[in-house]
Amino acid sequence: MISLIREKIKSLSSSEEISLFLKHKRGMAGLILLSFMLFIALTADFIAPKRFDEVDPSSRLLPPSTANIFGTDQLGRDVFSRVVFGARIALWVGLLVVVIEAGIGVPLGLVAGYYGGSIDKLISAITDMLWAFPPIILALAIVTILGPGLTNVVIAVSVVSWAPYTRVVRAKTQSIMSREFIIAARAVGESSLSIMFRYVLPNTLSSVIVLATLTIPSAILYTTALSFLGFGAQPPTPDWGAMLNEGKDYIFKAPWCSVFPGLFITLTALSFNLLGDALRDVLDPKLRLG
Amino acid sequence: MSRILLEVRDLHICYETSRGCVRAVDGVSLVIYESETFCLVGETGCGKSTLALAIPRLLPPNARLLSGDIFFRGMNLLRINENELQKIRGKEIAMIFQNPMTSLNPVHMIGFQVAEVPATHFRISWREALLTAIKQLGKVGIPDPDLRSRNYPHVFSGGMKQRTMIAMMTTCKPSLLIADEPTTALDVTIQAQILKLLHELKNEYGLTLLLITHNFGIVAEVCDRVGVMYAGKLVEVAEVREIFENPQHPYTKGLIGCVVARKKSKTRLNQIAGAPPSLLNPPNGCRFHPRCSYTTPKCLREEPQLIEVCRGHLVACHNYERVG
């Protein structure tokens, strides 16, 4: 089994996809930007000159300078340090949301596409209902019930936005089900579960990967939006959305308090979008979500 | 002849379409004996593939089994549940499909796919399954099977893919191998190789082969007995020599007449006039009567039943005496 995996990696690294991706300029820009974000998130402890919750009443709302390159906020905390630690939260939350979304959406899509009939109708009806709601409103409602907090925001955002996964995987499954190798798999006595997970799922993975990179930015945007509204991370957690919220009162007096977190939100979302577009072009040119 | 392996009794299958029920298999009964090669011949759309798919119950979702029974070693395949069926598929009854290009999963390595079969049916480790797979790949004539087992299907040629399918389907030494036009998608030299391979495996494992084809060359080459289908019905069953030397049904006679003869160049190819009937509402009486040159008023009214004209030779025609 291990040798199998090694073979797969070997054939992957020499594959056409990789060289195609390396030639994709915007994709590479996205990858570099994302690597930068990942780097600051992983090394935040060393990069940040101060702790994110280190309050200094004597130096409140100072403009950017050599001591505080992004300035300080209303409590005298270093904005740069907070932004750097915030990258950790944003990326982690984005990843977590996508994993949960895929965890809900992919199996449902597989089951709906595989069995069809009334099971498909039921799952599709639920998915359609979810599409019909504005996600942020529904997420707000869920957070209101669960109470504020980062975990609850993650749950709320995941629960409202798994529908695209179900849609995409269901459609892919249906097209794969009509392929002859599925009949061949049944002809050698494979069980339904085995066909779903070992024959159909690997064939849908390229679409799921593309969809995941394209939904990470929206996941990050939703969570920061909820944090901005005060439902997400509670102070003193350096969540970018929460920082925007705190900074908005001083937007004219000390714009750096909100500009820098906002810039980082934009850059992170942009990096994932660029990367996702490139992956889509390379892995799955047919999947264009408009 | 030896013992009966498979018996199909009065099988009716239809496809539900928006325009009505297409009766693809309409009252077919046949018997296949152990370790023989039985050929099912007929035009495209006459129901031969549907019949083949019905045996391991792999019909598409819009197909409906109206009535009938399929006995495999005394077990009614149409009555047992899905779990029991999964144990039979691949182990007792295996099937090879027409298009090897799409019959393999593009995301798994060849060796992995073949190894799946013994790993599913026997309690063996993955490593053993993989070794079995490599051995079987070598057996079906894949050169350098150890290395090739780590290839993905897209690097294989059509012939190699079909060999891989055969390896997959024979690793468990099934007793019945259904081959649904296994050579149609391949070029002629590869066709011959694949047929030879099937024949060798059949002799070695003693398996029974149900071969579906519309190629009379293949029939003459490998078959023991032949069943001719027309418009969802079996119209003639006989041993292969008998079919070629003494065809009793006008349709069989026409089909054999269509085969290109090597010596008679410069003559027009024979053909059967007309087109096969729509199975949505087949003609009354004998389904072949609109195209038949022996039609009598009885053919329009009454449907002929299969009758034994001589030992082992069954014909469904009112006028077989005039035809033969």
Image (tube, grey):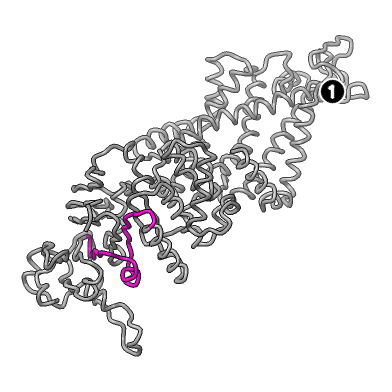
Q: Is residue A45 above or below residue A167?
A: above
Examine the structure image and report whether residue A194 is included in the region drawn in magenta.
no
Which quadrant, please, contains the N terminus of chain A?
top right
The answer to which quarter of the image holds residue B201 is: bottom left
Residue A226 appears left or right of B204: right
Residue stretch in magenta: B204-232
Residue B230 appears left or right of B213: left
Tell me the SS state at disc 1.
Answer: helix
Amino acid beneath label 1:
Phe
Q: Which chain carries label 1?
A: A
How busy is the neighbourhood of tag 1: few (under 14 within 10 Å), some, or many (20 plus)? few
Percent from the top left, x then y, of residue B301?
7, 66
Residue A44 appears left or right of B64: right
Residue A168 visible somewhere in the drawing = no
- Residue located farthest toward the top when viewing the structure as drawn: A57
Residue that carries the numbered disc 1 in the rendered image: A46
- At a point 70% along the width and 20% down the height, the residue shown is A242
Percent from the top left, x then y, of residue B35?
30, 56
- At a point 37% along the width and 45% down the height, the residue shown is B91
The answer to which quarter of the image holds residue B143 is: bottom right
The answer to which quarter of the image holds residue B322 is: bottom left
- At a point 72% along the width and 30% down the height, the residue shown is A265
Q: Which of A58 and B276 is in front in this view?
A: B276
